[in-house]
Image: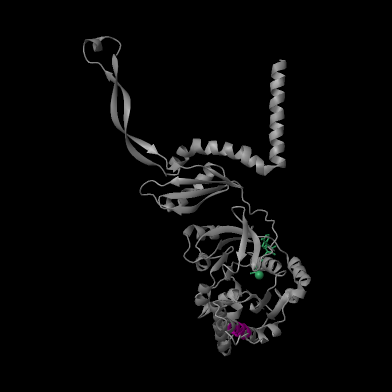
């Protein structure tokens, strides 16, 4: 009896210890206890799960079998049936699951490499991913890497995008951390790697919140921020202290875009004179301040009330396209937000979209917008974009220019926080007239 009490006491203490470990140090608990236990379950159930998800293949194998053979002869006349057991080599069909490599833990789940059966393609695993996730009771399973003959699956235990906590400022020039990726890592936008971005989504999907996060992250940096807000300026006017220029009407937009094109041409002339291919290879003292241009609701720039506006719209479209085409090498970056950005807006929009190599697709109302935004990415990215729920504003699919995509969510940045950042760093705002009025620096010796 005392022994039993001691055993029960030890078990209770162990359970309490594990509970406390999990509660107070979840990361080490995951790596030390939960992941190894999960790995055992995954290895033990993989064959069964792969069979249920139709990933197995039948292979012919030679097997040694022990066969029962009825003995014919005098013995068979007796009441009991007499059988003799004989060993035989037989060809049998054996169900084989794809070979599972070593499971590698990640902060929120694990990665695992699988060897494809002959005739299988990664799309078979994309189709099966949801079934695998249900079988292992995890939040999601995704194909993240494809090598000839192999795929890497990545299982996530819980959705890290439910509560996003991060600080947009990174301390690195032109780099912002606007939220988190589904793999638990930071979502980082680096304009020097991906110079222009398209931020699309239905109304109330989180486009302006992402713009707020970018303003908060860029405000403390030595950059000039420029806004186009044709919704009467209601979105960007509160950030005016940190904006070097803001256009709220079509007329202002035409003038501001002309300034921007002029500025890009100035920078180009300076680079040419110094034999530099882009502003980053210029001597530091000649390097111009980077400009980040935010366009809220791009459709407003292209809308025509009557034919008299046709010329203005066409000027706007051409100038915006020039800024996009030439700006990348000269540190003039674009973030274009819109509910749709398709050819229905007018000529030039498709060409502009092609220049915006970074893509963010929030919840959309029609599959066509997801197609337009994510282009010809993996069809799984389009499915993921269409599956974004209205209850989770800020969740989006992010694609860079390398073709990889992620589910992500921006950190919630209310207007007053972005306004505060704009006021706090107002002293860093470069004066627009000085910026665009400066003549190109041409070294006569060059
Ligand atoms: N990342 C986020 N986390 C939590 N809530 C968010 C997030 N992003 C947006 N929201 C919520 O969703 C609301 C709508 O977001 P937002 O204004 O950015 O949408 P929008 O796409 O700009 O819409 P519209 O096209 O009407 O301007 C916000 O007021 C905010 O409450
Ligand atoms: Mg908005």
Q: Is residue 432 or residue 51 the one in the foreground?
A: 432
Q: Is residue 377 left or right of residue 239?
A: left
Q: Residue 23 appears in which quarter of the rendering? A: top right
Q: Residue at x 59, y 77 (%)?
A: 330
The image position of residue 54, as x and y in percent, is 42, 44
Question: How many labels, in total?
Answer: 0
Is 388 drawn above or below residue 222 in the view shown?
above
Query: Up-down: is 10 above or below 241?
Result: above
x and y, in percent, of residue 235 in the image: 70, 73
Q: Is residue 338 left or right of residue 77?
A: right
Residue 285 vs 17, above or below: the answer is below
The quarter of the picture where residue 434 lies is bottom right
Provide residue 170's location: percent of width, then percent of height: 68, 62
Q: Residue furthest bottom?
A: 308
Q: Which residue is at a point 66% across and 84% down the rendered structure image?
A: 436
Q: Which residues are magenta?
A: 257-266
């Amino acid at each position: 009896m005392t022994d039993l009490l001691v055993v029960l006491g030890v078990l209770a203490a162990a359970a309490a210890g594990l509970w406390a470990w999990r509660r107070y140090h979840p990361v080490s608990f995951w790596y030390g206890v939960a992941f190894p236990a999960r790995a055992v379950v995954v290895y033990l159930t993989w064959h069964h799960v792969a069979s249920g998800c139709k990933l197995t293949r039948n292979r012919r194998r030679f097997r040694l079998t022990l066969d029962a053979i009825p003995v014919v002869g005098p013995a068979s006349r007796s009441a009991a049936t007499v059988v003799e057991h004989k060993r035989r080599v037989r060809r049998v069909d054996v169900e084989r699951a794809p070979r599972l490599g070593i499971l590698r833990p990640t902060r929120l789940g694990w990665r695992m490499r699988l060897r494809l059966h002959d005739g299988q393609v990664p799309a078979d695993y994309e189709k099966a991913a949801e079934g695998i996730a249900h079988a292992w009771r995890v939040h999601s399973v995704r194909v993240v890497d494809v090598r000839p003959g192999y795929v890497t699956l990545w299982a996530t235990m819980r959705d890290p995008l439910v509560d996003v906590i991060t600080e947009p400022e990174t301390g690195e020039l032109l780099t912002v951390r606007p939220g988190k990726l589904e793999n638990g890592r930071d979502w980082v936008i680096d304009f020097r790697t991906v110079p222009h971005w398209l931020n699309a989504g239905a109304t109330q999907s989180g486009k302006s919140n992402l713009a707020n996060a970018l303003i908060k992250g860029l405000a403390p940096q030595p950059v000039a921020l420029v806004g186009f807000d044709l919704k009467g300026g209601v979105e960007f006017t509160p950030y005016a202290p940190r904006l070097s220029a803001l256009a709220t009407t079509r007329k202002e937009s035409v003038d501001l875009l002309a300034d921007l094109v002029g500025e890009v041409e100035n920078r180009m002339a300076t680079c040419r004179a110094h034999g530099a291919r882009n502003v980053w290879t210029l001597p530091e003292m000649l390097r111009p301040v980077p400009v980040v241009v935010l366009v809220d609701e791009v459709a407003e720039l292209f809308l025509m009330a009557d034919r008299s506006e046709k010329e203005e719209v066409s000027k706007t479209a051409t100038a915006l396209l020039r800024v996009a085409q030439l700006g990348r090498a000269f540190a003039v970056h674009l973030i274009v937000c819109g509910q749709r950005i398709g050819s229905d807006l007018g000529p030039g929009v498709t060409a502009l979209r092609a220049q915006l190599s970074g893509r963010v697709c929030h919840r959309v109302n029609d599959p066509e917008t997801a197609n337009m935004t994510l282009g010809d990415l993996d069809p799984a990215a389009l499915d993921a974009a269409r599956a974004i729920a209205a209850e989770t504003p800020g969740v989006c699919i992010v694609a860079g220019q390398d073709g990889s995509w992620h589910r992500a969510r921006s950190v919630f940045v209310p207007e007053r926080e972005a306004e505060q950042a704009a006021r706090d760093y107002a002293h860093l705002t470069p004066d627009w007239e000085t910026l665009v009025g400066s003549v190109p620096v041409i070294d006569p010796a060059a």
